[in-house]
Image (spheres, rainbow, N blue to C red):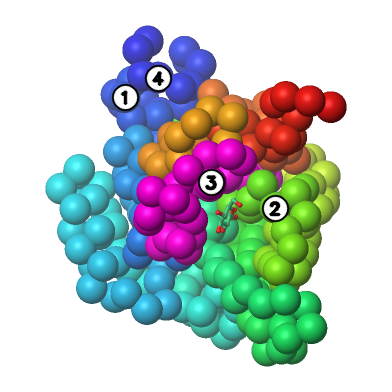
Amino acid sequence: MEGNFGRPGHGPARGDARPLYGQRALVTGSSSGIGRAIARALAEAGADVALNYTRGEAAAEAAAAEFRDLGVRAVTVKADVSREDEVEAMFAHTITAFGTLDILVNNAGLQQDAPVETMTLEQWNRVIGVNLTGQFLCARAAVREFKRRGPRPEVSRALGKIICVSSVHEIIPWAGHVNYAASKGGVMLMMKTLAQELAADRIRVVGIAPGAIRTPINREAWETPEAYASLLKLVPYKRIGEPEDIAAAAAWLASDAADYITGTTLFVDGGMTLYPGFESGG
Ligand code: BGC
């Protein structure tokens, strides 16, 4: 059963290599970076994909065209996930296009860094608004749709799946980034609480905590040889992560192979959470 994440006798009838065949997914913040790679992995696994973006319409459209070549449906939808009205419109648009939704990937996130004494309330609110409130608004809308639609055992054992993209900073404090670290710590307990609340409905809620991944958000940390060498001091595996490292984890977590996994975070971080300062000494 090469390439089949699912258990024989369950899941999609078609194609071992397409364990998400027939499922419909929405990936927030997917015009670039980790979100785009996740959307592609879900499409490669056979899911129809809605790509959400705020800026970067052309990039989202280009990704959608690329995914259609894989034989799935792909649509783009502009929405700021921190805004309730825009989230509601995004779900209405996606559900109209695809009929329903099986997988939500809460990926949209941003950084607005500053030392605490100069951080503005606007910077605090913006980061909490997108990274945490945005995940809440999207999760709520997804749960409503999963329950409205009911089970689809022909495509998935779960009623629905929600993947919350967090960060190693859901547990690693990060000086100079208090808004970001607080938002990701919040995502972690939101994810676990929703998992507990929704398990009996057969809705799985899981987290992925990326470490340092090569995307525009942390360009400063990898674009010069000096910065890269300094970054690697924090990464026991001694390479930066690529968006595809996160995407593979997301496609697996969304599949029936991970059907007994809920309420936990999968760290995809090359060991960043292993206290690399203790590689020697202590
Ligand atoms: C941040 C990156 C950072 C990484 C590891 C991520 O959540 O967005 O800027 O490089 O964590 O510290």
Q: Which residue is under mark 1?
A: 17
**SS assignment at label 2:** helix
- Find ligand 1 in the image and state its quadrant: bottom right
Q: Which portion, as a residue range, is magenta?
A: 205-234
Mark 3 Cα shell of 10 Å, populated few (<14), some (14-19), many (≥20): some
What amino acid type is highlighted by mark number 1? Ala
Of mark 2 and mark 1, the one earlier in the sequence is 1
Q: Sequence-wise, which precedes: disc 4 or disc 2?
A: 4
N-term mark: 4 or 3: 4
Horizontally, residue 217 falls left or right of residue 162, namely: left
As drawn, 122 above or below 250 = below
Distance from disc 4 to disc 2, alpha carbons, whole Å, reads: 32 Å
Cα distance in 3D space between marks 3 and 1: 35 Å
Q: CA distance from mark 4 to mark 3?
A: 35 Å
For residue 237, side relative to residue 224 (left or right): right
Q: Residues within 10 Å of mark 4 (few under 14, many from 20)?
A: many
Residue 206 in which image quadrant: top right
- The circle drawn on residue 169 is 2
138 relative position to 128: left or right: left
Q: CA distance from mark 1 to mark 4?
A: 6 Å
Q: Give the percent coordinates (x, y) of residue 150.
A: 60, 48
Q: Using the image, tell me which numbered label, if any, was put on residue 4.
A: 4
